[in-house]
Image (spheres, grey):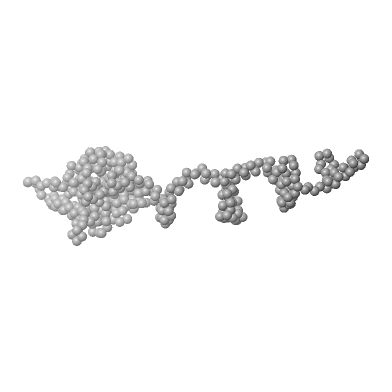
Amino acid sequence: MSTDVTLTSYILNPWTGTYHGGGTDLIALSYADLDYIPSANDPYKSTSGDVFKVYVNGIRIYRTDDQNYAGGNGFLEDTDSSGIELNDRPAVWTDTSNTVWTIDTATQKILLSKSAIAATTLYGSSGLAIDFTTSSTAPIIELRRAVQDLKTPAVDFSNASILTEQDLDNSAKNVFHVAQQAVISTENAMLYDSGTDTYKSTQPGTSTPKRISSVATPTSANDAANKTYVDGSSSTVTVAGIASDVTTVAGISSNVTTVAGISADVTAVANDATDIGTVAGQATEIGRLGTADAVADMAILGTADVVNDMNILATADVVNDMNVLGTADVVNDMNVLGTSDNVSNMNTVADNISDVNTVASNISTINAKVSKSGDTMTGALTLSGAPTADNHASTKAYTDSQATALALALG
């Protein structure tokens, strides 16, 4: 924990959890080096007209009895009004308490109470919610000595009165403390650097940058902008309006990096958006292809033998033959041949193919031997054997023998 002591302030910068008396509630702020001598009848005001102001992370911690000093010029914060507005928000003195901080003159300490602050309407969870958490960003706590009234001298001399050393000392100290307060205010101001022609918001005596607070909403192009304006209160800034989306993107930053690495592929997909849309329109058909039966069929089609067969079918000659077979007439003929009777007949012919081949090889001989015209046969027909039925053809020899036998019988 760093402790800074200036002409007018004692600062825990930051406070990191040290308590007064070994407890867990009171935070001690020493005023031993701030030239403060408490009045005998009011220890909260010095003999030279000084009072204390306590701040936690820049928020003024008012006591209820501070209303007694609120009439002094410079006592209240610039934006506050006694009993109307405290800490730049509507509030009255009863919204705080006298126990938020107390003075221990024996040890020259101001004791800041965490529990008392949390119990008030002004600083508790329903108000400004003063946070003393040290796990993330520890608070900065400041005890500041200030002249209670910058318009009226703390000591007023009267004619014919007894002039004491104490009165003179108190009067001189009042002026001296006003001067110290002015010096500190000047040092803490944002100083102009003529070398760089800029104003710098750095911690006095260091190069450490500090925040600038209470900045109004900018109206001109060269105005300083406050955080609210930058975060998106202006209609020209829209990021704050999609803060959840930005958070989502941040959560998938690795995926975004991956996409960036395949930007060429993404572009290629974008160029094929029409085709992708067409495929998406066939979602039902694609779903059918994904069934177990379809997958099994495609696995069969993917075997080496089937692929080889399909390669053969894809040759120009086979494709041409299939085109011929695909005409309407040929398809009709194949439908005729495909009837069960014709298939049965073709099976019978197939069983006697050798006889058919024999007939086919002797077709010219058969054509030479037989010519049929109506019921008349012409040409030579060679027969063997005798007829056994009335309608059988008979040989010449059989006929001649029958004629001879008839002649003999007729004698």
Residue 19: image location, x then y, percent: 33, 51
User: Where 201 falls versus 42 (above or below)?
Assistant: below
Q: Along the horizontal axis of the image, is 384 left or right of 287?
A: right
Which residue occupies the extreme left position in the image?
Answer: 160
Q: Nearer the viewer, residue 167 or 400?
A: 400
Q: Quadrant of residue 257?
A: bottom left
Q: Nearer the viewer, residue 378 or 301?
A: 378
Q: Nearer the viewer, residue 155 or 310?
A: 310
Which residue occupies the extreme bottom position in the image?
Answer: 195
Residue 140: image location, x then y, percent: 29, 51
Is residue 40 among what the camera can see?
A: no
Q: Along the horizontal axis of the image, is 318 left or right of 200?
A: right
Number of numbered callouts drawn: 0
User: Where 329 falls versus 317 (above or below)?
Assistant: above
Task: Write the residue at 27% across / 51% down.
Answer: 142
Task: Write the residue at 45% across / 48% down.
Answer: 275
Residue 221: image location, x then y, percent: 22, 50
Task: Write the residue at 31% across / 53% down.
Answer: 14
Which residue occupies the extreme front position in the image?
Answer: 411
Quadrant assignment for the N terminus = bottom left
Task: Write the residue at 27% across / 56% down.
Answer: 209
Is residue 387 among what the camera can see?
A: yes
Quadrant assignment for the C terminus = top right
Residue 230: image location, x then y, percent: 28, 48
